[in-house]
Image (cartoon, rainbow, N blue to C red):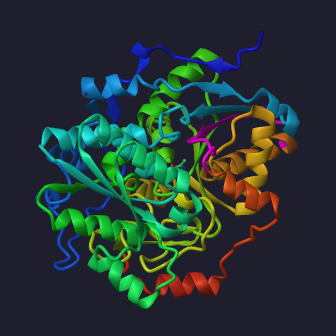
Amino acid sequence: MKETKIVLSEQDIPRSWYNIVADMPNKPLPPLNPATGEPISGDALAPLFPSGLIHQEVSQEPWIEIPDEVREIYALWRPTPMFRAWRLEKALDTPAKIFYKYEGVSPAGSHKPNTAVAQAWYNKQDGVTRITTETGAGQWGSALAFACQLFGIKCEVYMVRISYDQKPYRKLMMNTWNADVYPSPSDRTAAGRKILAEHPDSPGSLGIAISEAVEVAATNEDARYALGSVLNHVLLHQTVIGQEAIAQMEIAGEYPDIVVAPFGGGSNFAGLAFPFLRYHLTGERPIRAIAAEPTACPKLTRGVFRYDFGDTVGMTPLLPMYTLGHNFVPASIHAGGLRYHGAGVIVSQLLKDKLIEAQAVDQIDSFEAGVLFARSEGIIPAPEANHGIAVALREAEIARKEGKAKTILINLCGHGNFDMASYEAYFAGKLERLSLSQEEINDAVSKIDTPEIAG
Ligand SMILES: *Cc1c(COP(=O)(O)O)cnc(C)c1O
């Protein structure tokens, strides 16, 4: 029998997270205090994050040990399986070998619990009793709700309005795991009220929801904030994915020429790619790592590398990143998790240094790829994941034209079982092609008022 599913055992759950900063030729620039323009010290983050996570945020150590209790919870769904996509390869008539690492087996159905459980654990160590957060498509909120419940921490979620309306089941998952969920913009915060005053029908955005959750954490002593993407410690926690994937590729007797993952703020991309990039940086095993973003929110392929706020209202430190400007509100595409104006600092620096690549995918093409995937492999991917699959199909097509047997590894970062309304819209022909004109990009970017980064 051909080997289809490559599994590891519980002992193979990684013992450390991999911190790529230690191996980067150019370290990321520091976050800045917007008021003074000076680098932010770790202490300034204390109102928002527990000490263990702040330590990880600024760490230059290559390996950070995973606490036993976190590994034990990981064992509920890790190690995750890897599959050889035989039927997809056949459908594409490509000589490329396609593999996918499936993170949808977690309780929340995506990669997000890898960091949610770790973050809840470090908050628990500092005696935090309440964690606030934002969620876009609902995957992050449900992951954090699940993680907080395991540690007896109250979870308060600001959910982007468009997703709150489109995905009631995600909200109910969070409620099942004992979380309180509010549509954002909400009238519970000054940030939310300001947006509502200007745009009563605002569909919301991740940036707005972040502003609300940050405000509540910063103004309440018992509360801390948790972010599901973008930050260094979040990317760090996701590196269990790539470490397992390296072991699984070894079992398969292959090594990828290309790893590809969808890109919102960069965490599942980093999770898969960074452990492979470790060997790319040393020159031992070169690889192409491709981030797949939506054409409706193309910060990596069309944005600028600048200091910008992580949120919409301007409460966070300034982060050096690829961005479309913190005021940019992307169209209401169904891949809610990819509607973020910026990108993680580490991935941004890697892109600037041409150590990773990015490609943009239109939402119609992404669903076309996702449906072909579902019809070949069975699993119905999350709309976000469809972007990565679409890029893999492009690369497989190039391999077919060139007659080259490339090996491609996709991060299938979540299933789409709660996203069937978006598939319905696709089948009904209700999705639009969304590409921004250069004028629209220039207009968005011209609103960034921080100085250009020299060099
Ligand atoms: C959150 C999410 C994303 C986007 O976030 P990243 O930090 O870029 O990974 C993509 N896919 C799924 C399924 C998600 O839940």
Tell me if residue 416 is in the magenta stretch.
Answer: yes
Give whichever of 250, 298 is nearer the camera.
Answer: 298
Give whichever of 375, 250 is nearer the camera.
Answer: 375
In the rendered image of this protein, does residue 356 appear above or below residue 327? above
Region rendered in magenta: 402-418
At a point 72% along the width and 50% down the height, the residue shown is 390
Most extreme residue toward the bottom, as rendered? 198
- Relative placement, left or right, of 110 versus 215 is right
**Image coords of residue 444 (percent x, y):** 51, 83
Tell me if residue 18 is in the magenta stretch.
Answer: no
**Image coords of residue 294 (percent x, y):** 62, 63
The image quadrant of residue 410 is top right
At a point 21% along the width and 51% down the height, the residue shown is 130
In the rendered image of this protein, does residue 288 appear above or below residue 189? above
At a point 57% along the width and 42% down the height, the residue shown is 414
**Image coords of residue 33 (percent x, y):** 20, 72
Q: Quadrant of the N terminus?
A: top right
Give whichever of 23, 212 is nearer the camera.
Answer: 212
In the rendered image of this protein, does residue 310 appear above or below residue 149? below
**Image coords of residue 329 (percent x, y):** 51, 77
Q: Quadrant of the C terminus?
A: bottom left
- Residue 95 at least partly seen: no
The image quadrant of residue 256 is top right
- Relative placement, left or right, of 113 versus 256 is left
- Residue 273 at least partly seen: yes
- Relative placement, left or right, of 27 versus 128 is right
- Relative placement, left or right, of 453 versus 351 is left
Give whichever of 53, 359 is nearer the camera.
Answer: 53
Number of labelled discs?
0
